[in-house]
C-alpha cells in the first residue's frame, strides 16, 4: 500500500478538528445554550461530512459506471439526515445519543470505502487514510455522545 499524500493527510486531519473541538466542548460545558449550540454544530458538521463522503463514493462509482456504487453512495447522506435526527425529533433519543448514531454512520461508511477499494476504484492509499480519519471522527462523536 502506498503512503498517503501529505496534502491529503493534512487536509483530512484538518477536517477532524471540528469533530474533536465539538467533543471537547460537549465534555467541558454544563447544560445550557452554549452546550446546545456546540452539539448542534457538531451534528451539522457530521452530516455535512457524511454527505461529502457520499460524494466521494459517487465519484468513484462514476469513473467506472458502477450502478451499484451510485446507489450505495447515497446511503451515508440519507443516513446522516434521517437516522440520527428522526429518533431525536420523536423524543426516542436525546441529541447526544443522536451523536452516537452519527458515529456508527461513519463506521458503516468504511464498508462503502472498502467496497470501492476492492473494486480498484480508489487510490492505493485510500483505506489507510479512511481508517485513520474514521477512527478519529468516530472516537470524537462517541465521546461527545457520552458526555
Image: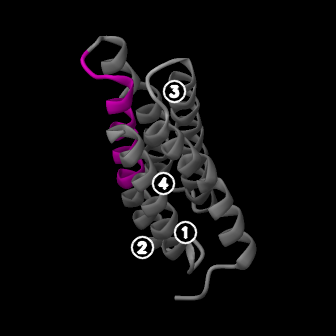
Please tell me whether mark 3 or mark 1 is closer to you in this view.
Answer: 3
Q: Earlier in the sequence, mark 2 or mark 4?
A: 2
> Marks 2/4: CA distance?
23 Å
Q: Which residue lies most toward the top here?
A: 90
Please say if the residues under marks 2 and 3 sit with CB atoms less than 8 Å apart: no
Identity of the residue drawn at 48% across and 72% down: 127
Secondary structure, mark 3, is helix
Secondary structure character of the magenta stretch overall:
helix
Residue denoted by label 4: 137
Local SS, label 2: helix
On the image, the x and y values in percent for residue 128 come to: 50, 76
Q: Which residue is mark 3?
A: 35
Dot 4: what SS? Answer: helix
Q: Is residue 90 above or below residue 76?
A: above
Label 2, label 3: how far apart the Cα atoms are: 41 Å
- As measured in the structure, the alpha-carbon distance from the residue carrying label 3 to the one carrying label 1 is 41 Å
**Cα distance, mark 3 to mark 4?**
19 Å
The residues tagged by marks 1 and 2 sit, at their Cα atoms, a distance apart of 8 Å
Of tags 3 and 4, which is closer to the observer?
3
Neighbor class of circle 3 (other Cα within 10 Å; few <14, some 14-19, many 20+) is some
Instruction: First in sequence, mark 2 or 3: give its number.
Output: 3
Residue identifier under label 1? 121
- Between the residue at mark 1 and the residue at mark 4, the CA separation in whole angstroms equals 23 Å
Of labels 3 and 4, earlier in sequence is: 3
In the rendering, at what x and y percent does residue 38 appear?
Answer: 56, 31
The disc label shown at residue 118, or none: 2
What segment is highlighted magenta in the picture?
92-109
Q: Which of marks 1 and 3 precedes in the sequence? A: 3
Percent position of residue 135, x then y = 43, 62
Residue 56 part of the magenta segment: no
Corner quadrant of residue 126: bottom right
**Front-lying residue, 117 or 136:** 136
Amino acid at each position: 500500500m502506498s503512503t498517503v499524500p501529505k496534502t491529503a493527510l493534512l487536509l483530512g486531519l484538518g477536517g477532524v478538528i471540528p469533530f474533536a473541538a465539538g467533543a471537547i466542548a460537549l465534555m467541558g460545558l454544563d447544560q445550557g445554550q452554549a452546550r446546545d449550540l456546540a452539539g448542534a454544530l457538531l451534528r451539522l458538521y457530521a452530516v455535512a461530512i457524511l454527505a461529502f463522503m457520499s460524494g466521494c463514493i459517487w465519484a468513484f462509482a462514476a469513473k467506472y459506471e458502477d450502478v451499484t456504487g451510485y446507489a450505495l453512495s447515497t446511503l451515508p447522506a440519507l443516513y446522516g439526515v434521517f437516522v440520527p435526527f428522526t429518533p431525536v425529533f420523536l423524543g426516542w433519543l436525546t441529541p447526544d445519543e443522536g451523536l452516537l448514531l452519527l458515529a456508527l454512520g461513519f463506521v458503516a461508511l468504511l464498508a462503502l470505502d472498502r467496497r470501492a477499494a476492492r473494486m480498484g476504484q480508489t487510490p492505493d492509499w485510500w483505506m489507510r487514510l479512511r481508517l485513520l480519519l474514521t477512527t478519529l471522527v468516530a472516537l470524537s462523536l462517541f465521546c461527545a455522545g457520552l458526555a
